[in-house]
Amino acid sequence: MAREIAILKRAKISKAQQYMIFAVLGSSLLLGAAFSLIMHFVNQISFNARVISEEDRSIVAYSDAIKNIGVCRKPAGAVYTDDELKKCSPDSIDTAQVPGTLRSNILTGLAANESLNSVPKESTSSCINPATNRNYTYEEIEDYYEAAETTEELMAASALIQKCSALRVIPDALPAFRNEEALLASLNKIFIISGWEPDSISPTGTASAATFGTGLNTLSVRLSVEADVNRTKTVLDNIERSIREFNIERATIEWGSNNTLVLQAQATAYYMEPSTITETNKTIKPGDKK
C-alpha cells in the first residue's frame, strides 16, 4: 500500500513538472514574441523619424534657396508654406521687397556700379530714352522700374536693366558659355577700331579648365598682325584695354618688309560655366544607420 502511494506521488510530481515546463516554455515564447514586436516597432519609429528628418532638411534647403535668390518674399515662418508658394509671383516682386537677396544685389548693386557704367556703351534702339533721345542713365532706368505697377511693366523694366545698365558689361567681360564666333568678332572689332584689317585670326580649337576657380574655362586664339610700328602698338593697346580679357601667352615679333612689324601671337580668353542649383537624391533604407 505504501508503495502504491509513493508511485502515485511520483506521478503527480512528474505531471506538475511537465505543467511547469510547459508554462515556462509558453512564457518564453510570449516574451520572445513581445520582444520581437517591440524591436519591430522601435525600428519602424526610428526609420520614420529619419525619413521625416531628411524631409525637413530638404524643405529648409529649398526654402533657403528661394529666400537667398529672391524669387519670393520672405516667408512668415522659417520655411515657406504651400499657400505662400502658390501666391508667389516672381515677375511681380519689386527688389525692395527682397532686400539682401541675389536678385536685389544684381538689379540694384551691380546694375548701378559706377566702374561698370564707365565702360562705353553702344547705342541701340531699345536703350534710347524717347524723352531725351539718348541712352538711358541708370537713374532713369531706376525711376522706370520704381514706377512700374503691373507685372508686364516690371518685366519690361527688368529687361531694360539687364540690357541697358551696367549689367550689360558682365557677359561681355566674362561670357557664360563657349562661343568662338563671339570671341573672333570681339577681336575683329578691336582690329577695326585700331584701323587695321587682320590677315589671320582663328581659334586653336583647344580649351581647358583654368586653375583660377571652379567653372572658369579657357579658349585659345591665334592672331597675326603685319603693320607699321604705330599700328601694331595701337592694336596691342586696344587688346589690353578690352573689357574682355585676352591674355597673350606666346608672341613673336620680327621685322618684315617695308619697315613693318610681323606679330604672331597666341592668346587666351576666358568664359564661365553657367551656375546651377544641383538637386541630390538620398535613399534611406531600414537598418541603414549611416
Image: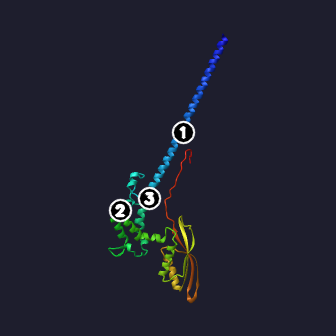
Residue under label 1: 40
Q: Secondary structure at mark 3?
A: helix
Crowd rating for badge 2 (residues with CA inside 10 Å; few <14, some 14–19, many 20+): some
Q: Which mark is residue 92?
A: none
Question: Residue at horizontal 60%, vertical 26%?
Answer: 22
Q: Secondary structure at mark 2?
A: helix
Crowd rating for badge 3 (residues with CA inside 10 Å; few <14, some 14–19, many 20+): some
Q: Which of pointers 2 and 3 indicates the residue nearer the eye?
A: 2
Rounded to the nearest angstrom, the CA distance separating label 1 from label 2 is 55 Å
Q: Is residue 61 above or below residue 252?
A: above
Residue 157, x across and y down, in percent: 37, 66
Taking depth in this image into account, of 56 and 40 the one nearest to the observer is 40
Q: Is residue 195 above or below residue 129?
A: below
Mark closest to the chain's N terminus, 2 or 3 = 3
Residue under label 2: 151
Residue 246, x across and y down, in percent: 52, 74
Residue under label 3: 68
